[in-house]
Amino acid sequence: MKALVDAALVGLARAGTPPADPDDAGERLVARAGEISAEKALLVRLGVQAVRARAGTVAAVGAERPKAAAPETRPLCSPALAAIVADLCAGKNKAILAEALLRMDQRGLRLPPQVLPALAELRAPALLPAVTQVAGERGRWLAEHNPEWRWLIDGVAAVSLAERKRAWEEGTPDARMSALRATRLTEPGEARSWIESAWKAEKATLREEMLAALSANLSASDQPLLEQALADRAAGVRAAAAKLLARIETSPLAARARARADETLAYTAPATGLFGALKSRLAGTSHGTLAVSPPAAFTPAWADDGLLEKPPAGTGERAFWLRQILSLVPPAHWERRFAATPESLVNAAVKTEWAEPVLAGWTDATVRNEARTWANHLWTARVAREEPEALRELAAIIFPMMDAAVVHETAAEIVGGGNPQAWNGILAAVPRPWSRALADAFAKALMRASTSTQLGWQEVSAWRAALDIAAPALPIATVDHLLVLDPPAPDTPAAALRNALDAFRSVLAVRKRIDQETRP
Amino acid sequence: VPLSADQIAALAPDAKALAAGKQSAAPRLWGALGRSEAAIWGECTGSAVYQVRVALDDLVAKCSCPSRKFPCKHSLGLLFLAAESPGRIPAGTAPDWVTEWLGKRNESAERKKQRAEKTADAAPPDPEQQAKRAEKRLARVLAGVEALELWLGDLVRTGVASVPPGDGVWSTQAARLVDAQASGLASRVRRLGYLPRSGSDWGERFADGLGHLALLVQAVRRLDALDAPLAADVRAAVGWTVDRDEVLASGERVSDEWAIVGQMVTADDDERFRTQRSWLRGMRGGRDALVLQFAAGTAPFPEALLPGMVLDAEMAFWPSAHPLRALVSERRGEMKPLTSRPGASAGPAGIDGLLERYARALGRQPWIERFPATLGAVVPALAGDPAGERFQVIDTDGRVVPLAGSAHWKLFAISGGHPIDLFGEWDGRSLLPLGALAEGGYHALTSGEPAA
């Protein structure tokens, strides 16, 4: 056969007619065709051999059979739920998928095997740990056969240190940074040594990013590297190093920052004793008083600690410097120095004429040092001061640190105000599922809006965003009346929300079905 | 109707209608739902209230909405609703708008039958005229074949490898064959043209295609000397068609409960034309049948054939030395889900048995391109490194065949290392899996879903 194929490819003119084996049955068949040209003979011989090759295929033997998957211990979910999960795997809304898997896990159910490849392909650690249980023994078996699916059973630590190191050395910028961040969580010293050895070769933007990775598990051992970075050519790198050094209490920079900040704040505790308390209540100083003295001039040496001299347009320089100075000091320092609670200090700060930069500086420091006790009080103070811009920035970083109940309560209040533009950026950070009070406030505001005759385009677009956020977040027990909500009348401004409302309702409907299919 | 979501999806004309259909299954949209022996129905609130009904025997749907897609999203929605929450569709007396439609359907089916009988009975319009036309066509085909043979001779004399890549000779030659009314030969030549330098073993595959084409050329020149069934195969491979009426009038008829074991839909480049290949297998007799259906754009395929269902029907086969292609000449009642290997009593279902049946079939009809394969109790396994995503199946005797294509993870997952029944197409080299039965449940493997 090989000789025939070669002759056809190279050409009879060059290869010549391959010899025929007279004992070969196929060749004898061709011979019966009688006198034909060499070309025609080759074509017919190819044909006979092609059919013989197909018909004569013999199966191989001796392949190894895979070990069978262990018997399942969990009952199968309903076919309807399996179909929903299959759709969710293919769709965009991964929050609902997480909810479905969580509910299935709580009920002790598992998915049928045919859904598992699409699920495993998602490689979404956010679905852990429920996904491992819901995938059952078959999921475990699949993960043992496909290294890409190891995450199903091993979780995030699936990637070994050696593999992460390789990703760090050879990967794309994104892969390098995620390998670095993952390693910093489990082997902080190792991660630091990677940065040290790569430091000189990398560009400023990457140096800055590498430093940011040190934020997790920060310790005094990181000090030498950070001191070196503090003398970096790039201002961004210097500022990033300063922020981190400020968090290491024993570092010279932290000591300098404390000394600098101590110059700016002085606190007087409220008077004690019956008479004193009454007097301070009358004066509105029951939380004590804070004296704020922002620096009058920028000391050039401050620049070495990452402070900037020039404020952005619209901000006064003294306020700008003050905010930066305070942001470099862990809030706990003030509790010790003034022997006062965060609540007292925040409330005292509100009363001063420099409230804005003080609160902003403390907020920055609270976020960087994850000072939980400060977060609630700062948030309350800023809500009271009606600073929507500041709140928007705060919400995403500060909500995860606050008590969920407090967040829900405050979010319900804001939603109750009825202006969707005020919630933009805030709702997304509210932990799920929402409280019933927040859900009710949202539903009420939505009903009002869908029948409103005065709805600007800005409000419409804010509502679109809000519906997107609310659909996976509303507790499922509260949505029945929203599912049957009448669509907005065609000639009202709310008609522009029709598509967004349809999408909102269909997400709710899917969640409702997940709920029904996972009821005991 | 015990249909699965996958099976309903196979009915959708396109991905958009499918997605909209799922949305339309929301119970809040539906009223006046009901079912009888013959149909399910309901009123769906969309932009207006639409009357939706689906006949249970062949799943043909009718909706009062103005959509030009068939079935429309409301009809699909009703099917999804019936599958998801059958409890919402109570048995009841069909309203007039359902019974009238069912009546009309019966009438038109009756008319069609009468028409078919009439054509079968009626003498051909003018036998002399027809014979003349046939003779003229044969002469044209033979002239085309003559030219093709000369060209093939040149090709092997100078060598296939000497044709520059991307050269137009293949399409030129194919176009000449179309002119000679030999479209089957034309598409074989066109496919040959894709092969050069298309992978490491292209020489082998090219020689295989070239050899089969050469045999066909020989056969068509000796058409008169061949047995009638084989002559019919040669004529079909060259491009003569036998239309449905002829098959209905004179084709071999086989009654059985036919399991739809595999289905594949392919679309031409601009998605204007879709071809559906369905493999059926007799539950009792183990006979294989291939039903080809064609549709323009998003039009539905005329016969509703859902993979994984069993259809009580009579099939009529096209004439052939190894008949495979068939049409449904009569269907009786609703489809039922497939739960066991069809034709289990008809013979062994190991790999050796498949290869032997294939060899015998090629002995009768050497141009079979896709051979139906039913394998019992095989275990799918990875062939080589998982990253290569290559698979094979192993039967109880330890025989192995490779699977065509790659990434058969769904099949692998379904089996979990346990034996399953597998349905697919065998081409002499590898098996293309189309469906599997595991733990009494059928899974479609190559998508019956519409292209997105």
Image (cartoon, helix red, strand yellow):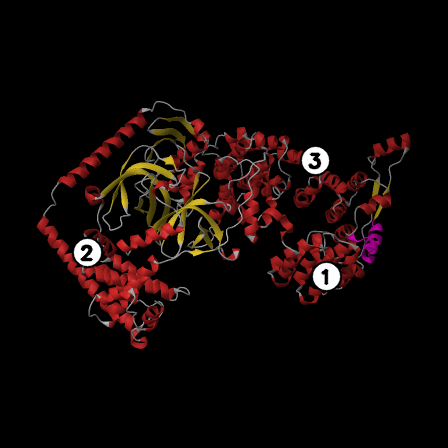
Write down the residue under mark 1. A193
Q: Is residue B46 shown to the viewer in this render?
A: no
Majority SS type along the magenta span:
helix
Where in the figure is residue A278, as x and y percent of width and height?
87, 30
Q: Is residue A462 left or right of residue B435?
A: right
In the rendered structure, find residue A406 and report the number of the disc placed on it. Answer: 3
Distance of mark 3 from mark 1, alpha carbons? Answer: 41 Å
- Which chain's residue wears label 3? A
The reply to whether label 3 and label 2 mark residues of one chain is no
Front disc: 2 or 1 = 2
- Which chain's residue wears label 1? A
Q: Is residue B128 left or right of residue A15?
A: left
In the rendered structure, find residue B226 and report the number of the disc placed on it. Answer: 2
Residue type highlighted by circle 3:
Val
Does residue B294 belong to the magenta stretch?
no
In the rendered structure, find residue B136 and report the number of the disc placed on it. Answer: none
The magenta stretch spans which residues?
A247-264
Distance of mark 3 from mark 2, alpha carbons? Answer: 89 Å
